[in-house]
Each structure stands twice: as structure tokens, then as C-alpha cells.
Amino acid sequence: MNRNRTADAIVVGGGVIGAAIAHRLALAGLGRIVLCDQGRVAAQGATARSGGLLRLHHTAAPDTLLTARSLPVFEQWTERIGGDCGYRRTGFLMLVGPDHVETLRANGAVAADALRYERAEILAPDEIRSLYPGLSTEGVAAAAYEPAGGYADPAATAVSLVASARRLGVIASEGTRVERVWERNGSVAGVHTGTGRIEAPLVVLASGAWGDPPAAHLGVHLPVVPRRIGLAQARLPGAGRRGSDASVPTCIDDTIGCYFRPEALDQLYFGVPSNPEVDLGQDVAPLTDDEVGAAVQAVSRRVPAVATAELVGTRAGYDGYTPDKRPAIGPAGPDGLYLALGFSGGGFKMAPAVAELAAQEICEGGAVLGKAVQPLLEPYRPQRFESGNLITPEASYAHM
Ligand SMILES: Cc1cc2nc3c(=O)[nH]c(=O)nc-3n(C[C@H](O)[C@H](O)[C@H](O)COP(=O)(O)OP(=O)(O)OC[C@H]3O[C@@H](n4cnc5c(N)ncnc54)[C@H](O)[C@@H]3O)c2cc1C
């Protein structure tokens, strides 16, 4: 029996995006907010499986600007949000081969500018090895270095957002699947859930890979495709100890097409490439030996110790991908419906800024198209998929 039958806002999806938006709406004093998740908040979707890499370096400036606004929140989590997000400053390196050094400089300059640094730090191979002796630099021409880059713990981040939201009065309604957004006279009136109806003039769909089906009958059709992506975990003594011979950064390697980061002091997490064909109706399939084997082979070219390291874990999750691999953020469909989904394998690091700006738009414009506009969110509008105005990289790489 559902007793929470009226609200001022309903947020659908208790991953890091929905949790952060619910928290921000509560901070803004929006009133009674219900955060619905079909499972447990912070546990069901991509967030709980995410690698949590934090970096500014991107191929499109809008992404850099959102991550630059988010990084200080991760750095000052306890003061700004409360609790612990598990932020660790390991330094971030973007590695490229000789054909992409100019691109690296251009993208690095956008990142440096976003943090008001004088210029991007571009490292040569010998400088890379002296900072991180655990790396081979074979085939690397240069790296963009972000000293404050690193990682946070995505599950802990979302749990602490939900805890702070709860302290502000947000009701986390777990095991509550939203079947349909409900509309009356052109405006949102609430949602139908598996346990009854909740009335509210505002609904935020932050449903990750599960996408927009609850709003499909209202004419909302986003090209969001679920994909399974994974991580493997190896024991690598010293990987996270600065000064150790095995030290490695948080890293994206464009020469090989892989990414990794240290975990605590003596482990390494590394990416296992995505699988486009998934069925959301099923539990996420564990990574196969072949998938992990291919990733070990790739990463060990950059971190040689991985070739003989003990594998201690794997995990996989679904994230929602859009055609330009950027999220859909903004009003869509009837007045009062706001979307924040399709984060395409990269939503964690930008969640604080997305939530801050989305909450401002919602509070100022009531989630009505064109009524309140945060310029940093303009490139991400859901309507771009119909108009063909997709986000395109200003300067791109071989793999990224
Ligand atoms: C293996 C892996 C590694 C990654 N690495 C990184 C990284 O290093 N850096 C980075 O920035 N990003 C990374 N990502 C991506 C990032 O984690 C995601 O983009 C982000 O977590 C998406 O958050 P979300 O809240 O949109 O989605 P989710 O965390 O998937 O949450 C969506 C929630 O919505 C709920 N839901 C859906 N439909 C309904 C419904 N109808 N009713 C009720 N509840 C519903 C689901 O149960 C789920 O809990 C990674 C992802 C994975 C899987």
C-alpha cells in the first residue's frame, strides 16, 4: 500500500543523477519530493558498477565545462554535500600517439581554461615515467596531465546524496517502478507506479539505461540504447602509492583504446569494452573470460604488471547510450516533464553540475520548454536528436 500519494516533485531513478537532482531540488526548497527506484536506490543501475574516473579532458567543450564545475564538489564533498564520496586525487593522464599531439594540446587548453589554469600541462614520455613508474610509454608521444584528476566511489557518492536528500525531507521510495507518467490538460499530473498513483506537477526522468518508456505514450521517444559495460579488478601492489615503482595514474590511453585507475593502494580497475546488444529485461550478464582476457592484453601493454597480476573481481552494468554519446537533459513532452538520462558511459563525473543546473532550470521554469535556460545545458537538449543538431567533438582522437 503506497501512502506517499501526493508530492511537489517525483524523481524517477535513484542512480547518481536522480539522487543528485533530488538533493538539489530539496536544497532549493521545492517541497515534498519523492525519489522512486524500481529496486534499491544507488544499487540498481550503472552507478553501482561505475569506475568513477574523474577528469576534465574531453573532446567537446560542453562536457569539459560540466566536469570542471563538478570536480570541486567531489574535492569538497563533506563540506558541500555531507558524508564521503571516496574522492582520491591520483592525477589523470590522457595519453596520445604522435598523430594526436596537437589535438591533445587543444583539448588540454579547454580544460586548463575551465579551471583558470594558465595553460595545460603537457608531459613528454620521460616526464610521464618519472611521475608514474608503473607505466610503459611505448607508442606514447605526449600526455595531458590533470593533477586534481582521480576517482571517487560512485556507490558511496549516490548513497551520500540520498542520505543528504533524506535529511532534507526527500522520501526515497524503493521497489517502486514507475510505469507511466500521467498527464492532464497538457501538463504532468503525476505517475502510475506498480503500487499505485502519486500526484505531482513535476516529474524528472533520471532512469538511465531504462530510458523513456514511462513517457512514450506522451510522444517522448529518445534514441537511448542500453549497453553493457564492465570493469575488471587486479591486485597490483603499489599501483595507488605515489612514489612507488608500480605507481599509475587514473588514465585514458588513446594509443591502445583502454582506461584504468588505481583502486586504494594496491589494486587496479580497468575497463572492459562495451557490448552493444543487451536485453534490459534480464539481469546484467557477468563479464566473460574472453572479454576480460582481451582487456588484460590491452591494458598490460601500458601497465606491464597487469599481464601477471591476480584478477580479483569483475563487474558489469547497463548505461543508456545516445547517438552522440551525450545525455539528454531538459524539458520534453508535457509541461512539468524533465529528462536527465542517456549518460552514455560518462555521467558520473558530471553529476554534481548536471544536478545543480537542472534543479535551477526546474525551479525557475517549472520544467516548461524554453522557460528557464542554463546555457551550460543548452547543447544537451533532448530535441537535438530530432533537429539533427548533435554534439560533435571539436578535436577528436583515434578511440575516445
Ligand atoms: C562499468 C562502468 C564504468 C563506468 N565508468 C565511468 C567513469 O569512470 N566515469 C564516469 O563519469 N562514468 C562512468 N560510467 C558511467 C556512469 O556510471 C553512468 O553514466 C551514471 O552512473 C549514470 O547514472 P544514472 O543515474 O543516469 O543511471 P543509473 O545509475 O543506471 O540509475 C538509473 C536508475 O533508474 C532506475 N529506474 C529506471 N527506470 C525506472 C522506472 N521506470 N521506475 C523506477 N526506477 C527506474 C533504475 O533502477 C536505476 O537505479 C561507467 C558505467 C559503467 C557501467
Image: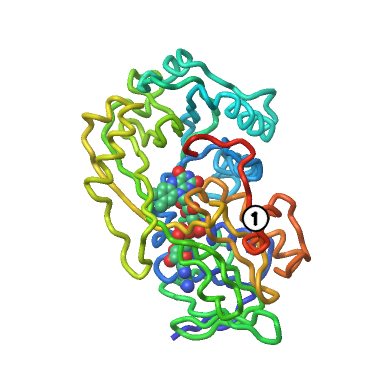
With respect to residue 146, does 333 lie above or below? below
Q: Position of residue 219 (x, y in %)?
A: 61, 77
CA neighbours of label 1 inside 10 A, class few (<14), some (14 to 19), many (20+): many
Q: Position of residue 321 (x, y in %)?
A: 49, 56
Residue at point 24% right, 41% down?
312
Q: Is residue 300 left or right of residue 201?
A: left
Q: Is residue 69 left or right of residue 242?
A: right
Helix, strand or loop at label 1? It is helix
* Quadrant in which the N terminus appears: bottom left
For disc 1, the marked residue is 380
Residue at point 60% right, 25% down?
102
Q: Amino acid at mark 1?
A: Tyr
| 29 or 256: nearer the viewer | 256
Residue at point 38% right, 20% down?
138
Mark 1 Cβ and ligand 1 under 8 Å apart: no
Q: Position of residue 375 (x, y in %)?
A: 74, 51
Q: Position of residue 325 (x, y in %)?
A: 53, 51
Q: Is residue 50 visible?
A: no
Q: Is residue 266 visible?
A: yes
Q: Is residue 53 left or right of residue 328?
A: left
| 340 or 96: nearer the viewer | 96
Residue 270, quarter of picture: top left
* Coloring applied to the structure: rainbow
Residue 223, quarter of picture: bottom right
